[in-house]
Amino acid sequence: MSQSTRHHPKGRRRLSRLVNIGVPYFWLGLFFLLPFMIVLQISVAETALAQPPYTALWEWVADGLLQIQINLQNFMLIWEDDIYLAAFLNSLWVALICTLLCLLLGYPMAYAIATAAQRRRMLLLMLIVLPFWTSFLIRVYAWIGILNSNGLLNSFLLWLGIIDAPLQILHTQTAVYIGVVYSYLPFMILPLYANLTRLDPALLEAASDLGCRPLRAFFKVTLPLSKPGIIAGSMLVFIPVVGEFVIPDLLGGPSSLMVGKLLWTEFFSNQDWPLASALAIVLLAVLVVPFVLMQRLQQNMDEAAS
Amino acid sequence: MKRRAWPLIGILAFGYAFLYVPILLLILYSFNESRLVTVWSGFSFKWYGALLHNHQLLDAAWLSIRIAATNATVAMVMGTLAANALVRHGRFRGRTGFELLLTAPLVMPDVIIGLSLLLLFVAMQQLIGWPTGRGFTTITIAHVTFSMAYVAVVVRSRLGQMDASLEEAAMDLGARPLGVYMRITLPLIAPALLSGWLLAFTLSLDDLVIASFVSGPGATTLPMVVYSSVRMGVSPQINALATLIVAVVALAVVIAGISLGRKPGR
């Protein structure tokens, strides 16, 4: 038995390599990477009344004559028409504001959980993750009933006498902020918590022994050391929110146009596949910078851990 | 220290209230006789009754569950293979690209994944005649593509923390690598596999955007039905559905808590 395995360790290792690396690589290459090439190709096609509704990139016009047609009009339209530029800027703005709000609420929460008694920590963390297991769509829907002009929040405020007439919150940008912070808060808290529990308490003790007050010690020691957690959490919120569709669609209004919703409309309502593809390409280009930043950080952390 | 903690506890309480009040309100109003959110006209199970007779919704739920289970199983295998590759095969050629491809779906906006996969399926159908239609298969493939990354994250951290001495002992005793993996490694990482499976299942059950792109006529998933009825405004049947989902999740958590609590040495 032992002899036979020692005879071919290389061969077995090669097989294990092939399966473990090859199979997921092939899947992701085929179903994740290749599709982007096709999106790129179709973004330079023209809309056509055909099935599928776009023109081919290349065509054999005659024997040995290949005609390649690249149509940059979609990108020019995105650049020139204010609505697209406004949607991109607004998406980035919403993502930025919501990342900051998540950080503002999530950091103290993660800190409180990380410094809680050991036996309570798991329960507190569990309560953060739990809403994630119930439907995202339904949790966003819950806010419709709350923010509606005859909804629970308005009724409550009217009953308290704080306002005289119902506030218009639903279908405004404010509703989008609320919905995004509500949905993405756990994504901010989890990496922050993971980072904060790894901090060495001896550092804070040392600061305290040297006469540093707790609040000052927090700003001088804890906060700088939790930078990787802050960046990781912020990226997990920022990047997907830029392309968010469900929240702006259900809670937002005409003033809160976001690129994810625009792409959806171009694709489903206007049947303009090339323009939707061009929007996807631009969105991808916008997200590459924060994504590479996140990836770099992840690798640094992995190297530090190993 | 104690006194300083009060503002922190206040923020924590606010955060939890923010996360849970909307869900609790949904549950509460699922038992409301009236259609309106603002009027409480008496306790009633009538929306649950309506839900049970809503065939469109039930069919969609069954399709979603089948897709979610298939997706979770395939994603569990793929994610575990990917985690093996990252933890066991060190610095192989193309590792950076591999990690990039694996992490990108975690943050990639759904609209991009959905659109790009649809265009791939259309192109493939033109070129090789497969997939012939869009529905169960295409939705499952799309879901595996993004949920395997989540499984890989969970399994990877478990594999990384694992005590290597048991595997080494088995190797020294002459077990073959595959045998060691099956009989030692897999049982040790089983909790991670289970949580990865459940995570992939939930992600699939929850997805509206990607499924909308890669689905075809005749294949309507639960989130699509929920979405179209929610667009019309508040619907008490959806409240009843939400309550059922919360009940199932809570039950699963209680069962998981009990079975973990019973384990010796914990």
Image (cartoon, coloured by chain):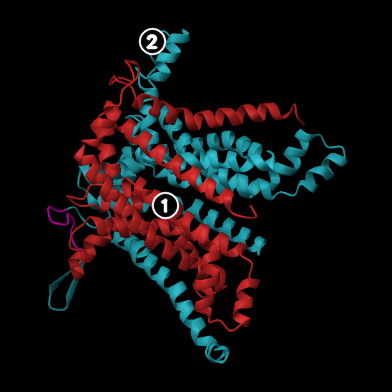
Chain colours: A cyan, B red
Q: Which residues are magenta?
A: A48-57
Quarter-of-image position of residue B56:
top left
User: What predominant SS class does the magenta segment belong to?
Assistant: loop
Q: Position of residue B73 (x, y in %)?
A: 38, 60
Task: Give the chain of mark 2.
Answer: A
Q: In this image, A39 relative to B183: left or right? A: left
Does the magenta portion include A178?
Answer: no
* C-beta proximity under 8 Å, tags 2 and 1: no
Q: In this image, A64 relative to B156: left or right? A: left
Image quarter of the N terminus of chain A: bottom right
Residue depicted at x 18% and y 52%: A47
Q: Nearer the viewer, residue A129 or A233?
A: A129
Q: Nearer the viewer, residue A33 or B229?
A: B229
**Dot 1 amino acid type:** Met
Q: Position of residue B59 (x, y in %)?
A: 22, 45
Q: In this image, A1 relative to B125: left or right? A: right
Q: In this image, A102 relative to A86: left or right? A: right
Mark 1 secondary-structure assignment: loop
Task: Return the residue at label 1.
Answer: B108
Quarter-of-image position of residue B47:
top left
Q: Could you tell me how many numbered marks the image carries?
A: 2
Task: Return the residue at label 2.
Answer: A165
Residue depicted at x 33% and y 38%: A82
Q: Nearer the viewer, residue A189 or A69?
A: A189
